[in-house]
């Protein structure tokens, strides 16, 4: 893939081009950190349906995609938003109502699955989950697996160590690779070619990007390539993996983006209360997603005063004195 500025586009265009009904989509971030929320809201706004969603340990992004009616199947290690929702509210309701099918793995297994996809190999071995119900209980049945070519034939495989007792491990678990149609990430900085820099913890984002057929990056800042070349060792995602670059300030809001802003505790608390009731949640979707044109419109509803309140301290990377109750 050649480098070029034609990758810079609006979020509406990026989602329309790379995310369709039935797509296998992976989103980055972790619980209430660096979820690609602007993209999540745009997917909901475009009323894309029947997504097969992958995430490591995501919170707000997963919950809102499910609450927005976009997801039919989910593969994940953990879905929660910290103290605000130890288990994501709309996620839990959808599972209890039989509206989505979920297959769960350990945190380490999901990391290995994305890593296998990034390596271009079908599986990786681990001891993680031995002796647990994760091995025994499958979310997707074999009938569905037989007809879905993008879903592996088995959740995992328990295999006797082919090298005998070498390594002092009798049994290993083989976990299948994840190969998303598109991975969506939010990063701090990117250039017009698609080279990206993540500050702070990268979670499984790098592996998710390299495992996918297409990658959409939303970023806080679109910076000149020369800026990223000054310290190239700090750049984790090379341009050749990226198809779309979308500058979106506060693109992870209401989750945190290290060194730019903190998570919005007040918003997340209000969201949890709304999500617990179908009627109130419908009003939430209308106010913050469907009745606004884009993420900037959503942020306008939140208000500059609140956005200023969660702005990160430059020396610490998070908001100092923020009321997190």
Image (tube, rainbow, N blue to C red):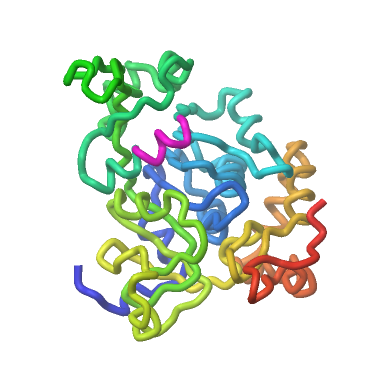
Looking at the image, residue 76 sits to the left or right of residue 304; the answer is: left
Quadrant in the rendering for residue 216:
bottom left
Residue at position x 75%, y 55% from top?
A: 265
Q: Kindly identify the residue that appears in the image at 32 percent across and 23 percent down.
A: 173
Q: Is residue 179 left or right of residue 162?
A: right
How many numbered circles are shown? Answer: 0
Image position of 5 with respect to 320: above or below: below
Prevalent SS, magenta region: helix
Residue 218, relative to residue 100: is it above or below? below
Q: Is 170 in front, or is 307?
A: 170
Where is residue 71 shown, x and y percent of the image?
Answer: 50, 39
In the displayed structure, 69 sits above or below 5; it is above
Left or right of 183 in this view: 255: right
The residue drawn where x is 34% and y is 63% is: 237
Q: Residue 159 appears at what percent x and percent y? A: 26, 17
Q: Quadrant of residue 68?
A: top right
* The magenta segment: 106-112
Is 235 included in the stretch rendered in magenta?
no
Q: Is residue 184 left or right of residue 36?
A: left
Quarter of the picture containing the N terminus is bottom left
Residue 294 appears in the picture as rendered: no
In the foreground, 164 or 286: 164
The answer to whether any part of residue 144 appears in the image is yes
Image point 42% across, 64% down: which residue?
217
Q: Quadrant of residue 41?
A: bottom right
Q: Which percent across, then down, holds residue 6? A: 31, 76
Residue 77: x percent and y percent?
49, 34
């Amino acid at each position: 893939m050649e480098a070029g500025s034609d990758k810079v586009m609006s979020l509406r265009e990026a989602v329309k081009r790379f995310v369709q009904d039935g797509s296998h989509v992976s989103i980055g971030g972790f619980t209430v950190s660096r979820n690609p929320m602007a993209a999540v809201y745009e997917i909901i706004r475009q009323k894309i349906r029947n997504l097969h969603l992958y995430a490591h340990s995501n919170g707000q992004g997963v919950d809102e995609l499910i609450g927005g009616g976009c997801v039919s199947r989910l593969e994940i290690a953990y879905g929660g938003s910290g103290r605000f929702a130890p288990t994501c509210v709309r996620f839990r309701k959808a599972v209890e109502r039989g509206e989505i099918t979920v297959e769960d793995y350990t945190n380490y297994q999901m990391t290995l699955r994305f890593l296998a996809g990034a390596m271009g190999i079908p599986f990786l071995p681990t001891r993680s989950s031995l002796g647990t119900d994760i091995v025994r209980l499958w979310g997707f049945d074999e009938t569905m697996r037989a007809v879905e070519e993008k879903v592996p034939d088995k959740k995992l495989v328990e295999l006797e160590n082919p090298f005998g007792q070498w390594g002092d491990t009798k049994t290993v678990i083989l976990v299948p690779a994840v190969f998303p149609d598109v991975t969506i990430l939010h990063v701090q900085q990117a250039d017009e070619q698609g080279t990206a820099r993540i500050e702070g913890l990268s979670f499984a984002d790098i592996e998710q990007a390299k495992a996918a057929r297409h990658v959409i990056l939303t970023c806080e800042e679109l910076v000149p390539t020369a800026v990223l070349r000054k310290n190239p060792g700090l750049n984790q995602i090379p341009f050749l993996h990226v198809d779309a670059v979308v500058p979106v300030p506060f693109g992870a809001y209401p989750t945190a983006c290290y060194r730019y802003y903190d998570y919005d505790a007040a918003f997340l608390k209000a969201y949890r209360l709304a999500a617990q009731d179908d009627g109130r949640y419908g009003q939430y979707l209308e106010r913050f997603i469907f009745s606004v044109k884009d993420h900037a419109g959503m942020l306008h509803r939140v208000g500059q005063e609140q956005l200023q309140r969660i702005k990160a301290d430059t020396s610490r990377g998070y908001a100092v004195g923020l009321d997190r109750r």
